């Protein structure tokens, strides 16, 4: 045995960003399979053959790999301590933002 238990030949570890060799091999093989069997033309053909509900479900499942997951946020606001003017400002701001969004659509 070259090294004592708990020691290695590289005490600083692997350089950041260096990909594990096994992981890289698996990614390369998967990429080959995807390129061979899931071309954009084949995907378009398969999507056309799906029922609308299946197509939407597929689209939503694929989005999970593209868009970051949204985290729930909680807003605690004590309306009792706000003045009527403050409440009016909040309401007008929300109405203005909703109107802007309606104008974009």
Image (cartoon, rainbow, N blue to C red):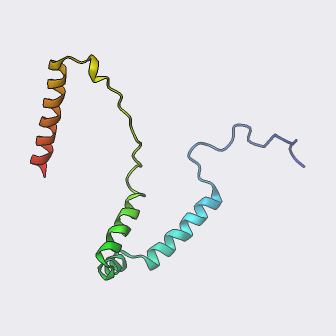
Q: Which residue in the rendered view is the most extreme toward the front?
A: 80
In this picture, is 37 found above or below 64?
below
The residue nearer to you, when weighing 29 against 79, is: 79
- Residue 99 located left or right of residue 19: left
Q: Position of residue 15 (x, y in %)?
A: 62, 43
Q: Which residue in the rendered view is the most extreme toward the right?
A: 1
In this picture, is 4 found above or below 65?
above
The residue nearer to you, when weighing 10 against 51, is: 51
In this picture, is 41 found above or below 79?
below
Residue at 15% across, 41% down: 98
Q: Position of residue 70 (x, y in %)?
A: 39, 46
Residue at 28% across, 17% down: 81
In this rendering, the count of numbered labels is 0
Residue at 39% across, 56% down: 66
The residue nearer to you, when weighing 65 against 70, is: 70
Q: Position of residue 18 (x, y in %)?
A: 59, 49
In this picture, is 3 found above or below 35?
above
Q: Position of residue 97 (x, y in %)?
A: 16, 37
- Residue 53 located left or right of residue 19: left
The residue nearer to you, when weighing 43 against 32, is: 43
Residue at 29% across, 80% down: 48
């Amino acid at each position: 045995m070259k090294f004592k238990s708990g020691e290695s030949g590289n005490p600083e570890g692997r350089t950041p960003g260096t990909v594990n060799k096994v992981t890289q091999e698996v990614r390369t093989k998967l990429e080959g399979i995807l390129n061979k069997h899931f071309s954009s033309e084949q995907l378009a053909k398969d999507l056309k053959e799906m029922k609308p509900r299946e197509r939407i479900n597929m689209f939503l499942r694929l989005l999970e790999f593209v868009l970051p997951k949204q985290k729930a946020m909680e807003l605690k606001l004590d309306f009792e301590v706000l003045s009527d003017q403050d409440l009016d400002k909040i309401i007008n701001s929300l109405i203005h933002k909703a109107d802007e969004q309606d104008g974009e659509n």
